[in-house]
Image (tube, helix red, strand yellow):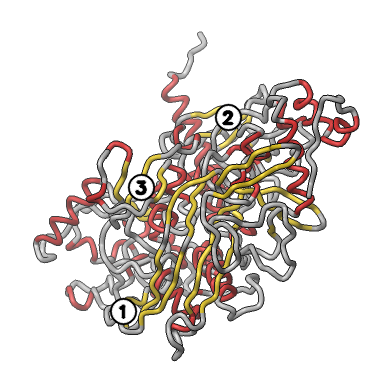
Amino acid sequence: MNRKFPKKILFSIILIIFLVLILIKFNVINCNKISSSNSEYSTTSLNSETCLDCHIDTKGYSSYHNPDLIGCTPCHLGNATESNKEKSHEGMILIPGNLSDAEQTCGKCHPEELKKINNSLMTTNSGLVAVDKFVFGEADSPDYHYHIKDLGFSPADKHLRDLCANCHLGAEKSEFGAIGQLSRGGGCNACHLNYNEDAIKELNTYLASDKTKLPLVHPSTDIFVTNEHCFGCHSRSSRISTNYEGWQETLLDEEDIKNVTIYRVLEDKRVYIHKQEDIHFTKGLLCIDCHSSHEVMGNGKLYTHEEQAVTLQCSDCHYKEKPNTMPFDSLDTESGLVFLHRSYSHIDKPIIKVKKDGHPLVNTFVDSLGNAFLIGKKDGQLHELKPQPDICSRDHAHKNVSCSTCHSSWTSKCIGCHNVFDSEENMAYDLLDKKYVEGQWKEYVAEFSSMFPAMGVRVKDNEKHIEPAVPGMVLTLDKGSFSDKIEGEDVSFHRLYAPNSPHTTVKEVRDCKSCHTNPESLGYGNGSLEFKNKKWEFTPEYALNKNDNLPEDAWIPFLKTVDDSIINSTRTDFRPFTVLEQQTMLTVGTCLQCHDDNSKVMQESLIKGLKPLLKDMSSECIRPEWK
């Protein structure tokens, strides 16, 4: 008689075999078996560690950082052969994982990851430093490589120390507690430290007892990164985290809020108003669902700007014909360990890999029918990945336009920024050295708002690619206030837009007019753009800036050539539209005065392009005249 195994037993057997195969393939080893050259670890065995004699019955550890497996000293160091409290704590690191000690702690087991992190932009802040020094005139290009730890005390360096140098992985985490909105840096802790409710409760009890009642729940060190881990730093600068969740910064104070339902006050007291959130956020997706460890930790190479380090494209998941995949047994070690730690089981299915650099998205797979899916890292929910709609895949007119240009609903807008140095400020705080000093750069902003992203042109290898742009630096720098000169005597003005991926993605694409007849999108700033008597006319909303006679929020003048000597971008390979490109955009805008987006002629223009249709124009059609 044939007997069938119970399903639970059969599943358990399959799971055990699966785990063993992964352990063999990726050479997962116990940290206590580190080479004998690492004497501080190899001389102590798990059985002889005295840490748990006092820290008894402690729980909360992640599966792979449990002291039953690796002990306590690989992370915290100290002398685990001593029973005396003082002697056992000699050389101990209470909060391991800061980059200052990572080579001794995390890096002992994760040396390759540490090498990558040390070269990552989150550690070097190269682009931030490069652009700032360029704007201050201390460098002739924004493309030199820097490291934020090497900042001196030049005007630009002091500016960074006072206003920007908080957000980098080298910043020390010196206090116990979870990663939150006010967290900055912390090395490995910045992403991998997790406190559950019990751990927070136990920590509070420990602190309230004057550190005499030892906590019974240890925070977990694991790969379960949440959006809160990203928020502290990425809600600053281009406001990616807040954009993603649908919040736009304002200049309001907390007491100014009338309708509390549409406002949000962050822990640092910045007030935000609700806009439209990113569709991926509404689906419950985390930042790391798209930006995996390969992008976040880097690949070990030094980059100057963030767009050089980011290789993921929308088309990797929303592919044109079929996704780019790899088999499970081709995963690199890092990806395999992520796969293991997350208890994924799709070893028999192809996994999507990023086209640009080939790194795998281990939370994706393609089934036997060719359907692609993403497993949400927040809750394990299965999300079907939709291919590009026909209009995207057959649209030749916009083949050089980035997905985010058309699918971003809004982006942050900041104008009228004035920077002046206050030499008499005696409570200034140096964000890099973490100490109070005298003298501080202060920033005054005229307005925070939002806009449709402007469009800029990325030029690379003689190819042009249209990407979103934001007014990154429309500002004045009172450099004279830093020197012995009189305040206001040496002031420089800069009108620099920056390439930006807003992270406000929506399913519905922007309509044609929002690009072809929208003055903000074209770079003119907000105002009225109208077609009258065969001519386009623009009336700006903002007054003209006395420094360059352009509207306060503009990038370029309306249909006028920009002097080649004028620098108007934070990148050397990114620029606004030329006059000819503006005219082409507005010619389409002229057609849209009569033909709506879905009309036959406009749909044909997407496939054939504009030139063939202009040749076959009706006698009733009007073409714009240019001055």
Q: Secondary structure at mark 3?
A: strand
Question: Where does residue 154 sit, x and y in percent of width and height?
Answer: 49, 84
Q: Which mark is residue 435?
A: 1
Q: Is residue 260 left or right of residue 98?
A: left
Could you give the CA–CA distance between mark 2 and mark 3, rounded to whole angstroms?
Answer: 25 Å
Of badges 1 and 3, the one in the foreground is: 3
Mark 2, residues whose alpha carbon is within 10 Å: few (<14), some, or many (≥20)?
few
Q: Which mark is residue 352?
A: none
On screen, residue 543 above or below 147: above
Instruction: Tell whether label 3 touches label 2 (CB within 8 Å).
Output: no
Q: Is residue 200 left or right of residue 517?
A: left
Question: Where does residue 378 sit, x and y in percent of width and height?
Answer: 42, 38
Question: Where does residue 59 sit, x and y in percent of width and height?
Answer: 25, 50
On screen, residue 290 above or below 595: below
Q: Which mark is residue 508?
A: 2
Of badges 1 and 2, the one in the foreground is: 2
Residue 47 showing in the rendered view: yes
Which amino acid lies under the numbered mark 1 shown in the image of this protein? Lys
Q: In which quarter of the view is residue 624 placed? A: top right
Between 494 and 535, the one lying in front of the other is: 535
Could you give the CA–CA distance between mark 1 and mark 3, rounded to whole angstroms?
Answer: 29 Å
Could you give the CA–CA distance between mark 1 and mark 2, rounded to whole angstroms?
Answer: 49 Å
Q: Secondary structure at mark 2?
A: loop
Q: Residue furthest right?
A: 615
Q: Which residue is mark 3?
A: 272
Q: Residue furthest front?
A: 533
